[in-house]
Image (cartoon, grey):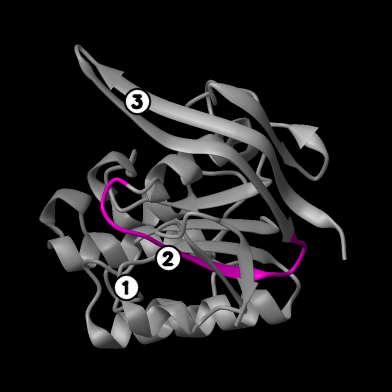
Amino acid sequence: MTCHIELKHLALSFSWKTYHKQIFHDLNLCIDQGSYVTIIGANGSGKSSLVKLLLGLIPPDEGDVTIHGEPVKAGYPDGVRKGRISYLSQQIEDLFFADTVREELTHKQSITLEGLNIQYLQSLGLSDQLERSIESLSGGERQALALAEFMGNRSDLLLLDEPSSYLDQDRAAVLKAYLNESQLAGKTILHVTQYPAEVQWGTHLIDLNQSDVKVVTL
């Protein structure tokens, strides 16, 4: 196995006025291609910061972040733009750009309704909602739409930041089935979660509460 994602001597801190916090110090991780890694940790431990580093949304203070051997550059998430990374944020209000469900699901050239598994659309309760405006959707329906759009991508790296926060039990089961199929297909998955039951979905674990952070096989 080769490192799909590698962090070398990574340091990251946060400062505001007189407040300063060291989030990561000399962090070294190698995440193998095809791994399903769940990430846990207390509030402020760096879960979302780790995802942002991988996307290039924030730069490290020191060290390197590489994906498939290529350095991640800070700025617009280049991996998402080029279709190499699929990202599902917990901030769903920032995800939508179109007016209707159909338009949202097909506005990217890399996504077609034919490419989306119709069974997933039905399970998410969206197959008969395609002409509805996004403004009319409830919070749970918007989360389902974000999940459907995420599942329509063909990237080999999936990043999820607490994706089930607003999902009901049935829709969470759809997410679990999709991630299991993706991992079996050889995709690499990083899944930030606060739910202990979801830790067991993965093959590996990163616990940011530990002083010696490493990738542990489950």
Q: Secondary structure at mark 1?
A: loop
Left or right: 75, with 103 as reference point: right
Q: Which residue is mark 1?
A: 126
Residue occupying the point 58% across, 67% down = 37
Q: Which mark is residue 19?
A: none
For the residue pair 20 and 128, the one nearer the viewer reads as 20
Is residue 57 something that shows in the picture?
no
- Give the number of the disc on residue 14: 3
- Give residue 19's position: percent from left, percent from top: 22, 21
Q: Quadrant of the C terminus?
A: bottom right
Where, by quadrant of the figure, is residue 55 drawn? top right
Is residue 169 placed above or below 13 in the rendered structure? Answer: below
Q: Residue at x 41, y 83 (%)?
A: 174
Residue type of the residue flagged with mark 1: Leu
Badge 3 marks a residue whose secondary structure is: strand
Q: Point out the stretch of residues depicted in magenta.
A: 32-44
Depth check: 156 or 204 in front? 204
Quarter of the image where one finds residue 175: bottom left
Image: 37 above or below 196? above
Q: Which residue is mark 2?
A: 148
Label 3 crowd (10 A; few <14 / some 14-19 / many >=20): few
Q: Could you tell me residue 89's position as x and y percent?
A: 37, 50
Residue 65 placement, left or right of 18: right
Q: Earlier in the sequence, mark 2 or mark 3?
A: 3
In this view, the mark in front (1 or 2) = 2
Q: Examine the structure image and report whether residue 53 is included in the region drawn in magenta.
A: no
